[in-house]
């Protein structure tokens, strides 16, 4: 040992300063440089050691210590470089270098082995993101816990303040929850009931126990997660209450029952009221039967009164609208002739100009091309002609509305029956036209030469409207192939390919006869016999009131002293025959029999 130490400290070599030729500048440059390097090398491990001690969460802290040893060894080597300038203890310097080499190689090997683990370490950005995510999750969890607590409080509040009694059962159907309303309804407190089975509490009425057991079985076997039952229950005071139980079962992921929630409604008062109601039902039924007959008569009268008001109001409205439309239409129609004349004059002037000045300036030629003068010259007269046709059509419709509405119904007047029929057809023209689904309904008119007839024109027009509307409905339903069943039960088929309405008028003695026939499906005798009964209709609900033909019958028979008949057979169409005298005796009727402007 002394020999080794002697060799390490031996100065039998030439000092390193000889290599620098003992030049002071070079010697002190190396001394100062090695001294500063050594100082830095010694300060770095101190800083690393301080960081490791302050941050106990630094991974691989032993590697930091290894780096510290390596740096200290390097710093010691630089200090020996200063020492060997004057003292040639090169053995000691070499040993320190060897130790530094060993520590360096060991550090390098360790670093290489730590590369995979080091690469897996998150970056500061990733760590910050992870920390932020963790903070967000903590905040979300705190918010969720607050929300859960609020939900729990709300649920508890609703249960305690519910008008229904709330009972909660566990998987064995023992009472687990018993609300205040349940305490009020049954009389037992929650402390007395929790943990008991229904049989142990003995609050189910004996005769209803089978119903309750069946309900419990449906809930426990998982077949019916929700059900309800009505049964009688005992209270703590041994009174009987009628209850409706609404039950909901909660099952786990494997379908096993976890708990059941029951909402209990006390229906005792309703049951007692129902029993009282049943006792009085028999006597009320008898009185109701009597009142029903009176009600039907009142409904008939009321419907006629309502229809009368509609007739009066609608007639005045139609007449007013027709008058308001007629004035501007006449103004337009009258001015169209002047516009047509002015148009011909202007066009003629332009043509004359073109004849005398065939080569106008470029600006005029461009304007002529822009407005397409040749097309305008040809199309404008066509437009004016179509406007005149449309205005004339509006005038005809307005005239028909005025003729049809005739709000002077309170007095009989001599009128042309054919004008009334034509006005009604014009109003119904939109239903007579063909569409993509229905062909055109042909109207065949065979008018005889008739004198003026004294009648209530507006109400007679309403009769035409009802009969023609029904004919159009019958033809519309019969488009294509239909199957008809007679009163006897036999059936047949009819194809209406050319729907047609025929109108025939003639003078029969001192009466005027109007026959309106269609080639529709007809009707059975049972339907025909009820045709003029109030509220009878074969149309779907909402499509008719069943009053149209009943009111029409009253207008013809009771108000005009005429007759209204119907002849029809299944598959052979229907024909209505109206006969009214030329000068019928005026019959005073109550307001309930005045027909209304009713379109079936």
Image (spheres, helix red, strand yellow):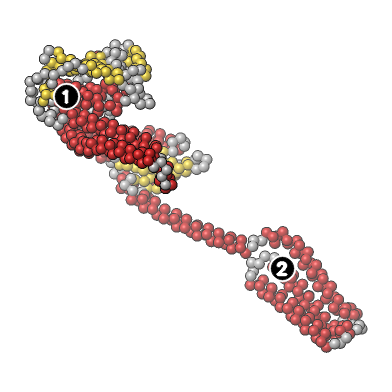
**Closer to us: 486 or 470:** 470
Q: Of helix, strand and loop, which one carries label 1?
A: helix
Q: Position of residue 294 (x, y in %)?
A: 15, 27
Q: Are marks 1 and 2 in contact (CB under 8 Å)?
A: no
Instruction: Describe the element under mark 2 as helix, strand or loop.
Output: helix
Q: In this rendering, is residue 20 above or below 57?
A: below
State the separation of the CA atoms marked 1 and 2: 117 Å
Q: Which residue is mark 1?
A: 460
Residue situated furthest right in the rendering: 12
Q: Quadrant of residue 537?
A: top left
Q: Nearer the viewer, residue 478 or 430?
A: 430
Number of dots carrying numbers:
2
- Ranked by sequence position, the earlier of labels 1 and 2 is 2
- Residue at x 71% of width, y 75% of height: 44
Which picture quadrant has residue 448? top left
Residue 567 location, x and y as percent? Answer: 23, 14
x then y, percent, for residue 516 = 23, 18
Q: Provide residue 475's location: percent of width, then percent of height.
A: 30, 20
In the figure, is residue 449 to the left or right of 472? left
Residue 62: mark in rendering:
2
Residue at image position (44%, 38%) is 225
Q: Is residue 140 above or below residue 255?
A: below
Numbered circle sitting on residue 314: none
Q: Is residue 474 left or right of residue 213?
A: left
Q: Determine the residue positioned at 26% across, 35% down.
A: 337
User: Which of label 1 and label 2 is nearer to you?
Assistant: 1
Badge 1 density bin: few <14, some 14–19, many ≥20, Cα 10 Å? many
Left/right placement of residue 157 relative to residue 287 reads: right
* Vertical position of residue 167 compared to residue 541: above or below: below
Q: Residues within 10 Å of mark 2 (few under 14, many from 20)?
A: few
In the image, residue 492 sits, relative to residue 332, either above or below, namely: above
Viewer can see residue 541? no
């Amino acid at each position: 040992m002394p020999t080794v130490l002697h060799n390490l400290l031996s100065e039998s070599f030439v000092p390193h300063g000889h290599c620098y030729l003992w030049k002071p500048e070079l010697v002190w440059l190396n001394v100062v440089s090695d001294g500063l390097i050594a100082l830095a090398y010694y300060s770095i491990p101190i800083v690393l050691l301080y960081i490791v001690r302050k941050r106990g969460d630094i991974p691989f802290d032993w590697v930091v210590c290894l780096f510290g040893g390596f740096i200290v060894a390097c710093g010691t080597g630089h200090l020996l470089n200063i020492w060997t300038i004057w003292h040639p203890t090169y053995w000691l310097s070499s040993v320190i270098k060897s130790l530094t080499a060993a520590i360096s190689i060991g550090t390098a090997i360790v670093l290489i082995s730590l590369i995979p683990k080091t690469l897996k370490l998150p970056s500061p950005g990733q760590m910050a993101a992870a920390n932020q995510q963790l903070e967000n999750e903590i905040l979300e969890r705190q918010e969720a816990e607050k929300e859960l607590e609020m939900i729990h409080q709300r649920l508890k509040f609703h249960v305690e303040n519910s008008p229904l009694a709330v009972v909660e059962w566990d998987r064995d159907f023992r009472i687990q929850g018993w609300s205040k309303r349940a305490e009020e309804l049954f009389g037992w407190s929650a402390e007395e009931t929790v943990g008991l089975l229904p049989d142990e509490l003995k609050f189910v009425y004996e005769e209803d126990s089978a119903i309750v057991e069946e309900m419990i079985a449906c809930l426990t076997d998982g077949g019916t997660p929700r059900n309800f039952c009505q049964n009688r229950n005992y209270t703590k005071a041994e009174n009987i209450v009628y209850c409706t139980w609404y039950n909901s079962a909660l099952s786990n992921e494997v379908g096993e029952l976890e708990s059941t929630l029951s909402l209990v409604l006390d229906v005792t008062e309703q049951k007692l009221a129902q029993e009282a109601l049943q006792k009085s039902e028999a006597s009320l039924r008898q009185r109701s039967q009597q009142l029903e007959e009176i009600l039907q008569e009142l409904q008939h009268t009321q419907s006629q009164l309502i229809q009368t008001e509609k007739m009066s109001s609608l007639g005045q409205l139609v007449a007013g609208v027709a008058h308001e439309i007629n004035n501007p239409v006449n103004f337009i129609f009258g001015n169209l002739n002047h516009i047509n004349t002015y148009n011909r004059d202007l066009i003629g002037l332009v043509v004359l100009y073109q004849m005398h000045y065939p080569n106008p300036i470029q600006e005029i030629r461009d304007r002529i091309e822009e407005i397409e003068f040749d097309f305008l010259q040809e199309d404008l007269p066509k437009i004016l002609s179509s406007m005149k046709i449309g205005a004339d059509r509006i005038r005809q419709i307005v005239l028909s509305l005025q003729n049809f509405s005739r709000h002077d119904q309170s007095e009989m007047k001599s009128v042309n029956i054919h004008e009334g029929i034509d006005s009604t057809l014009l109003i119904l023209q939109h239903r007579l036209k063909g569409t993509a689904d229905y062909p055109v309904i042909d109207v065949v008119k065979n008018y005889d030469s008739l004198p003026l007839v004294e009648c209530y024109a507006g109400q007679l027009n309403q009769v035409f409207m009802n009969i023609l509307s029904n004919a159009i409905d019958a033809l519309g339903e019969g488009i294509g192939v239909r199957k008809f069943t007679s009163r006897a039960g036999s059936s047949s088929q009819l194809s209406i390919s050319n729907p047609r309405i025929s109108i025939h008028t003639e003078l029969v003695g001192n009466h005027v006869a109007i026959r309106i026939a269609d080639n529709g499906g007809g009707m059975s005798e049972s339907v025909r016999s009820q045709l003029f009964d109030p509220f009878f209709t074969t149309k779907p609900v909402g499509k008719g009131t069943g009053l149209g033909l009943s009111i029409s019958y009253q207008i013809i028979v009771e108000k005009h002293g005429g007759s209204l008949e119907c002849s029809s057979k299944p598959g052979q169409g229907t024909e209505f025959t109206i006969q009214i005298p030329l000068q019928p005796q005026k019959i005073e009727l109550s307001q309930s029999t005045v027909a209304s402007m009713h379109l079936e």
